[in-house]
Amino acid sequence: MFDKDVTLIDSGEATAVEVERVLIEKNLKNPSTHKANLQFFVSDIPHKFTEIGERFLGQKLGRVRQPDFRF
C-alpha cells in the first residue's frame, strides 16, 4: 500500500512537458499551428499498427506503410 504522501507521475506526460521546455529554451519550438502530416514506417503489418495506434492515440494516424528495402 502507498503512503498518502506518494505522488504518481505519468512519465509520458512529464517527458512531453520537459521536451517542450527544452525546445522553447533553445528557440527550437515550431510556432506553426498547422497540423502535422504524419507518416509511419513499420516493420509489422501496417493495418494492425494503424488499428492499435489509432485506438491508443485516439486519433487517425497519417500514412502507415512498410518501407521497400529491395536494392
Image (spheres, rainbow, N blue to C red):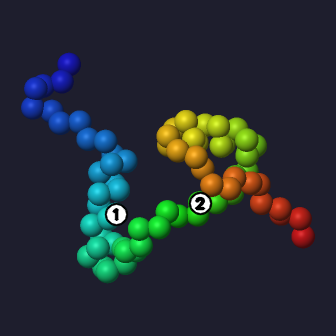
Check if mark 2's residue and mark 1's residue have beta carbons within 8 Å: no
Q: Is residue 40 left or right of residue 58?
A: right
Q: Is residue 45 left or right of residue 21?
A: right
Report the mark closest to the observer, 2 or 1. Answer: 2
Q: Quadrant of the C terminus?
A: bottom right
Residue 41: x and y in percent read 69, 57
Residue with the mark numbered 1: 19
Q: Quadrant of the N terminus?
A: top left
Three-letter residue code for mark 2: Leu
Q: Is residue 30 left or right of residue 58?
A: left
Please name whichever residue, 4 or 58, is drawn nearer the observer in this view of the structure: 58
Question: Residue 1 got which mark?
Answer: none
What secondary structure is found at the residue carrying circle 2?
A: loop
Q: Is residue 64 left or right of residue 21?
A: right
Q: Residue furthest left?
A: 5
Question: Residue 38 got which mark?
Answer: 2
Q: Is residue 4 visible to the viewer in this orientation of the structure?
A: yes
Q: Residue furthest right?
A: 71
Three-letter residue code for mark 1: Val
Of the two numbered discs 2 and 1 on the same chain, state the one appearing first in sequence: 1
Label 2 and label 1: CA atoms lie apart by 19 Å
What secondary structure is found at the residue carrying circle 1?
A: helix
Residue 2: x and y in percent read 18, 24
Task: Name the residue at 73% across, 46% down.
Answer: 46
Based on the displayed image, in which of its 4 quarters is residue 31 positioned?
bottom left
Task: Name the residue at 52% across, 44% down.
Answer: 59
Based on the displayed image, in which of its 4 quarters is residue 5 positioned?
top left
Q: Residue furthest top?
A: 1
Residue 32: x and y in percent read 41, 73
Task: Name the residue at 26% across, 76% down.
Answer: 25
